Image: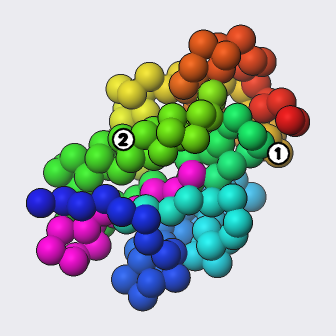
Amino acid sequence: MIHIAPDSPTTADVRLLLDEHLADMFATSPADSVHALDHSALSAPGISFWTARENGALLGCGALKRLNGTQAEIKSMRTTAAARGRGVATLLLARVLTDAREHNLERLYLETGTEEFFAPARRLYARHGFTICPPFADYVLDPHSVFMSLALSPDGDRQQQGRPDQS
C-alpha cells in the first residue's frame, strides 16, 4: 500500500531523489530555465513537503510553496524511475490538492518544462484541471517553461489569471 505523508526533504533517500531531479532538470533545460528547488530550499518556512512510500521505500515526493495567503505553487513533483506508471504522481498531486483546499487556498500554480521530457507532467496536470496561464510570481516568459494554474474556489476564478495578487 502506498502511503503519502509529510516528510523532510533532508532525509537521505529524499535528498538522493531531489539530486536526481535537479540533475535531470539541468540535463533537459538551459540553466537559466531550471526552477527546481534543492533539499535546503524545500526546507524553508512556507513550504509543505510530502513523500510517497511503500513498505518504507521512497516512491516520490512533492511540495507546496505558499506565494501569499490564498495562492501557492506546486514544486518538486518527482517519482522514482521504478515507481513510474503506478499512479504515484496522481496520489501525490491529490494530497497536495487536499492540503491546499484544507488551508483555504484559492489558486495553485506550477511551472514545468516545454521539452518532451516534461510531457507526462503536463498531461498529469491537465487531467486534473490545470490550464495554461501567463507567468506568475517572479517568473518571466521563457520558451522552456509552461505555466499552469488551477482555481480551487470560485474566488480563485475571479482573481487575475496571471500574477498572484500580493496580499
Farthest right residue in view: 166
Amino acid type assigned to the residue bearing label 2 in the image:
Ala
Is any atom of residue 20 visible in this view?
no
**Number of numbered markers:** 2
Q: Is residue 41 above or below residue 16?
A: above
Q: Is residue 110 above or below residue 25?
A: above
Q: Quadrant of the N terminus?
A: bottom left
Q: Which residue is mark 2?
A: 94
Instruction: Point out which mark residue 18 bears.
Output: none
Q: Which residue is mark 1?
A: 138
Q: Quadrant of the C terminus?
A: top right
Query: Is 89 one of the magenta-colored residues?
Result: no
Quadrant of residue 61 within the rendered picture: bottom left
Quadrant of residue 42 within the rendered picture: bottom right
Residue 56 appears left or right of 21: left
Helix, strand or loop at label 1? It is loop
Read off the magenta span.
Answer: 52-64
- The image position of residue 104, as x and y in percent, is 59, 34
Amino acid type assigned to the residue bearing label 1 in the image:
Asp
What predominant SS class does the magenta segment belong to? strand
Q: Is residue 145 above or below residue 10?
A: above
Q: Tell me which residue sits at (49%, 75%) in the image.
A: 8
Question: What is the image's colouring?
Answer: rainbow
